[in-house]
Image (spheres, grey):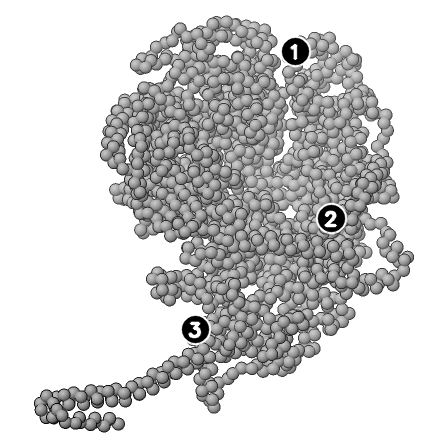
Amino acid sequence: MGWFNRAPASALDAQELEAATKLSIPAGRYSVSVRLIEAKNLQAIQAFNLFQTLLSFKLKTQTVHADRLPNVVGKVQLQRAGFEPQKRKTVVEKETAAPLWNQLFYFDGVEVAENELEACNVVVNICDKSRIGKDMVIGSIDLNLAAVYAAPNHEYWNQWFSLTDFTGRRSGSQGEVCLCVTVLREGEQQKLHLDEKFSDDEEEAVEVGQFETEKQKARRIARAERKLREKEELEEAENERKNVKAFILKANVYNGREFPRMDRFGREGLDAYLKITCGSAKEGQTRVLTSANPNWNQEVIMRLLVPGGENGLVNMPPLRMNVMDRDYTDADDHVASTAISLHDLYERPAAYSRPKWYCFYGGLRGMEVSFFSKMSKLAKRMNAGYVDGAAYRGRTLMSFELEEENRKNKFARAKKAIPPVLDKMGREWHCFLHSQVMSVELFQTNSKGKMLALDVGLGLDSTSTPSVLLRSEGGSLSGECYANVQCTLAPLLVKLPTPFEGPLAGTGAPDVFVNVNVVSGSGSRRVGYCRIPVAELMPVNETMRPIATPTNAEFPNGWTIQGWFPLRADALSNHKYGKSRRAENVKPIGQVLLRLMIRGAASGKRAAGETIDNEEFDEDGMSINSDAEAAAAMRRAEMERKADQRGARVAQNVESEFVDALPTRPFMLRMELYQARDLPAADAHGSSDPFAVLRVGRNIAETQVRQSTTSPAWFRELFVQVDLPLVVKDKKRLPDGTLVTDNDSSSDEDDVLLDPTTIAELQAGNDGDSSSDDDVDYVDVENAVVKKKSKSTFRGMGGGGAGQEFEGIAWWAAPSMNVMVFDRDEGILLGDNDPLSVLSLPLIHPAQMEADRRGDDDFSVLASSILSFYSKFSLDSELPDRYDNIANYKVGALSSEPEWYPMRHLNPQKGLSVSTVDSGGYILMHYELLPMPTEGIRKYAGVDSSFTSSALLRMNASVVKPLEDIYGSEAIAVEIILLGVRGLTPYRGSSIQRPMVEFELNGVTPLYYGATSSVARSRPSIYPCGTNANYNGQRFRLSGMMTKLDKVRLSLSIRVLDSKHSFSYIVATNEHKLRVRDSELHEVAEFVSKLRKVKPRKPTQDELRALEIAEMSATVTDSEFGFGTDTTLYLDDSDTVTDEWSESEFSSLAESGFFSTFKSLTMRKNNTESQNISSQIMSKSLKSKSGVGGKSRSKSMRRDGKEKSATKKIRADGFKMIRGMDGKRKYIPLEEFARQQQALKSIQEEEEETGSEDSDSDKTFMSGGKTLSDASSDSDDGEFDPTQDALKVLEELNRKEKNGSDESGTDEDEEEEEEEEEEEEVAAVFDDGTGKLPEWMVDRMMLADGLLEDEISPLQFMTIPVYHAKGFADNTSEKELAGFVKCAIRSLPLVEEDEFVAENLLERSVSRKRAFKEAFNRASKKKRLDKLHEMELARWQPEEEYASMNKDDFGELERLAGGGPLAAPPTDVLVRIYVIRGRDLRTNDPSGLTDPYLKVNQRGLSKSYGKREDKVNRTLSPWFYRSYQFATDIPGNTLIDVNVYDFQKRGKDVLLGTCTIDIEDRWFSPLWTQQLSDKPPLEIRPIYLPGVDMAQGYLEMIVEVHEGSENPVPAFTLTPPPVMEVELRCVTFGARKMANKDVGGKNDLFFRISLIGLDRTQTRFSESQETDTHWFATDGRGSFNFRNIFRFEIPVARAALRISAFDRDIFSANDAIGEVTIPLSSMCRQLMRAVDTSPDNEMATEATVELKSSFADTFASFSLFDGATEGKWFKLFHPSKPHECQGEVEIMLSLLPVRKAESRPVGKGREAPNRDPELREPVRARLSLMDPLGSLSLILGPELLRKLFIVGCCLLFVGIFAALSVFVVNDVVGAYIQIAIQKQAKAFGLVEEDAAPTPAPVPIG
C-alpha cells in the first residue's frame, strides 16, 4: 500500500508515461494453416490417483501414469471470442510417446479488423485418447496469430514448442510438439519450401578414404566443426525451450462503476463479476455481485505457464479483462472487455502497479434488454473488445503485478478482501464540459428535409442541441446533406477522477462521445459519432465561474479542442437491412465542426484532492489515523454533496442557445486537378464513369465525366470562393461575472478580434472598391488602413508559414475541403450518381518540417490536431494546435507541387477488411488559398462572361476551365499492335461472339484542339473463336501531349466490347500503366534470376573408384573433347546466369535482331533488368539513345497529295506559340511575349528556384537524358551498333576480372572454397526419394520461386488481364478475371512542323448552307472532320531514332501477329506438358487429405485431357508423372489450363486449383527460343482458385513447345522413380535390465514393433506387429529369438521402426515399460543406391542392408552368461522417467528387396524356413504339473518367493519358541502352586512346621 504516499503524477516512474509498444496488424481476410508433424516425450495421463490422494490428503486428478503410454491425438482450435471455435483433430497414434502425424489443417476466411488478429489464437492440445469419457489433455501450446504474422515470412516453420499444463496440476514441460504455422493476409503468398538437402552420415563418410586429398580433408574437418557447433546451438535452444517458466499474476480488483443493465428483470439488472483470461490458461474471476456499481475489493491470482525461448511472452495471448453478467439458465453475457499486453505488463511494471481506472467500450447500452431487437455479431464483437466500441459501457479500478514464480509467491492464495482504495482513487473533481457545435456535413445519407440533433456525452450524462433542418447540396451532391447548427450546448456536469494534473490527468475518465442523430417521423436514430479522449481536454480551465460559457475575449487563441472531427458510421442503430454491418462500420459518414473545453473551480479541486499528511498504515493496509481520515471523508462528502446540488440546480436553469454565425471574409481557392488512379469500380464491366466534385463550405465545382476508366485524367483548374470565418471580439468577463468591453487594449491580440458591425461595414465598403488586375485590396479593420499585395506572393508559400493576410481568421472554423469522386450513370429518366471516394483536407497544415519528420502519408487529414478517437493524426506536443502563432502553419497544400493524396472509399463492400485510408484510390492535385480578386473569380480565371455552365456554377462562386500548361509538355505517340484476346469468360451468362478492343491513352492532353487521336478501336473478330479472337496484327497509334511533370502517370485504358448484336457493349476493362520516363523505369525493382541448377548427388566411394579407373583408361584426346566445348547460358556449372559470351554468339544475336528486340520492350509492364550480360549491353545501348524528343529540329510537312489552302501561309519566325491543355494554339508576337516575360520574372523567381530543385525540366520526357543543346551536339556521333558495344563491355569485364585475379593472389583457394559452399547453399534440390537425379533432370535448370514468364521478360507481346465486376453486380469494388488482351506497345516522340503559323482547323466555322447540309448528312460531316484531322496530324512527324522500339523490329512483330504486307500465317505447334508432382495442395476435407487428379484443357475449346481414374489416393503431395500432348496454332488457342480436382465418390468433384500456361509468351520470346526451348526448366507453378489470389498449392511441370506436329520431336520418357517393394526383417533376440512391472519381480514380457513413416507422397503409413510373450521373465531378462517381417515401398520421405516393451496383463491393461525409435530413412536410401549401382539390380549380393552388432559392440558387450551378441542393443525409456533406462533390447534389422526375399524366404517368428540367422528356441522357464513347486515359484516370481521364504522362516521360529515356552511355563506355574499349597497347609496346621517339604508334583506330560 506504499503507493498511497507516492509523489504527484509528474514525478511518477517514467515507465508510466511510456506508450505501450504495439505491432500494427492491418485489417483484412486472413488464412491460417497449421501442420502437426510430430511430438515426443509425451506422458500418459491418469484421471484419478487414489494412492496419492490418500498420502497427500488432497484430491489428485490428471496425474502422470507411470505404467502406460498414451494414445495420442492432436487437436487444433482457432479461438476467437464472440465466435465458435473452429476445431480440427488428427488420427490417433496408439500407445506411443513419439507420435508422427504430418497432417495439415486450414482455417480460411478469418476476417478481422485492424489489430484484431491479436485476439485470435491457435491452441494445440495434445490429448490422451480415452475410450470412455473425456480425453485427458497431456499438454497445450497457445500461439498468438499476431506474433506468427510478425515472424519472418509470416510463419513458424518446423519449430519445436514445449507443451504445458494450463490447469496447473502438473508443472514443467509435458512434452514437445513440432509445428508449422502460417498466417497469410489475402493476396500474400506462402514461401515454398523445397526438398531438403542430403545430410546422411553415409554421404559424409564418402570423403574419407584413399580418394581424400589434404584440401578435402581440411574442408571435411571444417564442415564437421561447423555441424558440431550447430548441434550444440540446437541442444542449447532445446534446453531453453524445455525450460517452461511460471509467472504469477496478481490483479487487485477494487470497484466497478456505471455498468449497463443486462437483465430485463430484477432491481439492479446485472449480476456482475470480472473474469481475467489469458489464452487457455486457467481463468481467474471475482465473486458475483448483483449491482451495476459493484465493490469487489478482491485479489485475483493467476498462474501462467510461459513456454521457454526468447519469444515466450511475445507468443502469449493478451491479458483480457471481461466484465460478465452471470446467467443461471444460459451462457454468461459479455458486458464489456478490454485487453493489455502481457509482454508490456512485464516490461513496464510501474505503469500497471498503481490502481487506475480502466474504461470499457462496446455496443449501445440497452440493446440487451430491448424486446424488439436482437444483438448483432458486430455488437457482440464490440462487447468482447475486438472492435472499437460505439458506446461507453463502464469502468473498473484495478492494478496488476506480474513476476516470475518463486518460493515466496508459489503457494500464495488470493485474498478474499483487500483494503478499499475508492476513498483515495475515487475522488472526483466536479467540473463542467462546455461544447459548441457549429456545422455538420453528412456523406450519402439522403436525409434531406429531416431534422438533425447532436448530443455530447461523457459517461452517463449528456447534453443535446435543438433540432435543425438538414439541407441538400443539390445537383451532383443531392445525396450530401448539411446543417448549420450554430448552437452552444448547455454545460454538462462531469466528474473527473484522479489524477487532476500531470501527463496522466484525464486518463481514467471515459471518452467524450459526440452523437449525430437524424430525427424523422419514425423516431430518432444515431447515424454517426466520434470519440474524443478526455486526456486531450486537459488541463482543466480553473475559474471562479466554471459554468459560464468561455468567450473569445477570455480565450483569444480558441478553446481546448476545436475544429472538424470525422464521424464514424453507426452500424448498430443506423443499420440498413440487406447491407453488411461490418461494411457500414468503416464507412465514412461525414464530419462535425465543434469546440470543447472543461472548466472547473479551484475550490472543488482542493476539496477533491484533500488528504492527510503523514498518513500511516498497519500491516493489513488499514489507516491508523482513522479518526482524522473519517473526519476528512465526512467533510469532503459534504462538500461534494453541496457541489452536486448547486451544480445540478444551476445546470437545470441553463439551456442550449443558438449563437450567431461567425462573420466571414471571402477568399478564393484555386485547385489544379490533374488525374486519379485506382478508383473503385462501380459498373458491371469493372470500370466507372468518374467525375470529381470539389466542395468547400457550400460552394462546389465539378469536372467533366471520363468514360469507362478507373484512372481518369481531367486536367482542370478549379476556382471556388471560400468564406473564411473571422474571430469575433467578445466582451470580457470580470471576476464578479459582469461582461465589459475592453476598448483600451492596444495589444496585437486586438488586431485579430473584430467587431461584427465594423466587419460588415468594412466589407460593404470594400466590395465597391476596384483595383488593378495584379493587386488585391486588403483592409486592416482595426486601423482602416488599406494594404496591397500582389496575388503572386500568396502562391506557393514556400516558407511554410502563413502570411499576414490571414490574420484574424478563425482557422478552427474554416471549412474543410472535400473532393468527392462519383460514377455517372445515365438512366432512362434521370441520372444516377454512385459515390466512389472522398478526400477531406484542411486549408491549414502544420509546418512542413513536422510532416517531413513524421514521414507519414496519412499525416494531417483534417484541421484539428485531436480529431477523433479513430484518427491517426496528432501533432507534436511542442506545436499545439491552438493557432497561437500562424507562422507555424502552412496555408494551402503542404507542397508547392501537385501531390498524390489517398482517398477513402464511400461504399465499401468488404466490411472490416477495408482499409480506412487508401481503399478509394489516389488523386493528383494541388491547391492554394488566395485573396478574393476584386474583379471576381470569373474574370480572374479568364472565363468569358458569356460562358455559362448552368448547374455547375452557383452564383458565380466557382469556375472550371482547362488547366494551363504550367510545367511544359511534349508530344508523344503510343503505337499498339493487337495480337488478340485470350480466354474471355461469358458476360452475364452469354458467351462472347464478336469481341473488339478499344484503347484510350490517359494522362495526356489533346494533341491539337478537338483531337480524337487518343482513342482507337479495333474491328470485330471471330477467328478462331470469340473467346480467343485474333486481330491479324491491327496497328493503332494513340497520340497526345504529355506534361513534363513526372508525377502525372500515363496509362492505357483497355476495353473489350462484344458486338454480336446491332449494338456493342463493354464486357471487361482494365488500366495498364505505361512507363516512359526514367523515373518510372527505376520504379521497377532490379530483377534477380531465380533459375537454379539442381544440386547433384555426391558420388559414393565405389562410384569414385569406378570414375578414377575410367579416367585412367581414357585418352587425352577424349578428355579434351569432353571438357573443351562451350556451354550455353543456362547450362553452365554456376547457379546463376553466366556473364561470359563469345564473339560468335554476339554477332549471331546482333544479326537476328536480338538486341533491338530487348531495346524495344523497355516500356512494358514486366520490364525488369536481367542479370545476364545481354541486359548490361542493352542498358548501355539505351543510354546512348536516351532522350526522346531531345533534338529540336524543323521539319517540313510531307503529304502524298496537294493541300488546298484559301489563305497564304504566314511565317512563324516572329511569333511565340503557346499551347493550352485543350490543344488550342495561340501565337503571340515575340515583342509582346518578351514584355510579359519581363513582367512575370519577379513573380516566378521563387517558383524557378523550387522547380530547379524538384522538377526535371532539363531532362527529356522519356529518358531524362541530354538537353536540347547536348542532343544537337551529339547528333553526329554515329549510329548504334550493339555488337561493338557488347564487345566493349566484354573487354571491360575481362579486364576487371584479370585485375581482380592479380590482386587476389594467394586468396584464390579460399575464394573458391567460399564460392563452392555458396553454390551448395544456393543450388536447388530435387529429391524424388531415390537419392539421385533422374535421367530427364540431368543438366536441366529448376525454377522454384517465381514464374518463367518473369525470367523470359521482356516479352514480345504483353499479356494484360481484363476484369469485370464480381457477379456482374453494380456499384461494387470487387473484380474477377474476365480474360486477357495480348498486344505489343512502343512509344515514340512527335515533333510538330512549326515553320508556319498553324490554324486551329477544327475551330473554323462553316457556312450556313454547309451546316444545313451536314445536319441531314452525317457522312458528309464525318468526311469533313476526318479530313481536318488528317491535316492536323500531318503536322506531327515521329522521331524514330528515339522510339522505345525501332521501326523494323516493330514491323516484325506486326508480321508475326499476322499483319502487314508480309503477314506470317499461323504456325502449327506441338505442345507437351509433363506434370511431375503436386505440393501442399489445400483441401477443406475434414480428414485433411485429398484424392487429386489432373484435367488439362485449352481455354476456349471443349476438349480436355485427363481421367478421374488417374486419381492419387489420400495425399496432399501427389506423384502424378503424367504427360499430355496436343497441337494448336500460334496465334490462336494458346492458353492452357491445368486443373487439379479432388475426386468425390458422391457428388461433384471439387476444383482444388488451376494453373494457366501461355504458350505464346514462350514462343515469341527470343530468350526462350535461343536458350530454353531445347531443354526447358522444371517449373514449380502455383495453382489458384477463381477469385482467390492465394496459392492453393503447387505443380511441378515441364512445358515443351515444338514447331510442326507432323514429325514431332520424340518425347523423353517420364517415369516415376522405381518404386521398390522391400522387406524389413526385424529379429528380436532378447532383453536385459528390464524394469519389473508385476508384483513378484517378473514380467510377462513382449514387444510391439511398429513401422511408421511418410511415403513418397508425404502420406502417413503404419503397421504394428508383436512378438510372442515371455511369460514369467525374471531378473529383467527376456529371451525371444523372434522374427517380424514388414513389407513397404521405397522411396519414402521418412521411415522409422518403433519398438515398445510391455508387460502383459490378462485382467487389466498392459503395462508399458519403455520404447525406442530406430530411423530407417538412411537404410532405405542406401538400399536404393546399392540396387542402382549393381548390375544385378535387386538380386545383387550388395542389395541387402543390415543393422546388427559390429565387432566393437560385440567385444564391449560380451558376457560369459549371454555369449556373443548378434544384434544391436538399444536402450528403452519411458516418458515418466526420461533420464532412467528402463531396459535394453537386442535387435537385428535386415532390409532387402522383395524379389530377393522371395528367392530366399524366411518364416515369421521361428517358423520354417528358419535362417538368416537361424533362430533357436528361446530359453524360458515353463509351467509343469510334474513340478508343482517349480511351477508355483514361477507363478509367484522370485521376489515374491523370496519374501514368502523369509516369512515362513520367521513363522517357524515363532512356532518352536511357542512350543518350548509351554513346558517352561508349566514348571513355573506348578512350582508356584506347590508353594502356595504348602503355605496354606501350614496356616491351617495341617502340616507341621518342622516337617519335611512335600515333593513337587510331577510335571504334566
Q: Is residue 647 above or below residue 1676?
A: above
Q: Position of residue 441 (x, y in %)?
A: 45, 26
Q: CA distance from mark 3 to mark 1?
A: 105 Å
Q: Determine the secondary structure under disc 2.
A: helix
Q: The residue under label 2 is which amino acid type?
A: Glu
Quadrant of residue 670 within the rendered picture: top right
Q: Are marks 2 and 1 in contact (CB under 8 Å)?
A: no
**Residue 1082: x, y in percent?**
70, 33
At label 3, which amino acid type do we have? Answer: Ser
* Residue hosting label 3: 1708
Q: Residue at position x 47%, y 46% from top?
A: 317
- Could you tell me the amino acid type at mark 1? Ser
Q: Is residue 896 left or right of residue 342?
A: right
Q: Residues within 10 Å of mark 3 (few under 14, many from 20)?
A: few
Mark 2 or 3, nearer chain start: 2
Res 1263 → quadrant: top right
Element type where label 3 sits in the image:
loop
Crowdedness of circle 1 by 10 Å Cα count: few (<14), some, many (20+)?
few
Nearest to N terminus: mark 2 or mark 1: 1
Residue placed farthest to the left in the image? 1884
Q: Residue under circle 1?
A: 1242
Measured Cα–Cα span from mark 2 to mark 1: 64 Å
Q: Which residue is mark 2?
A: 1314
Q: Nearer the viewer, residue 394 or 234?
A: 234
Q: Residue furthest front?
A: 1890
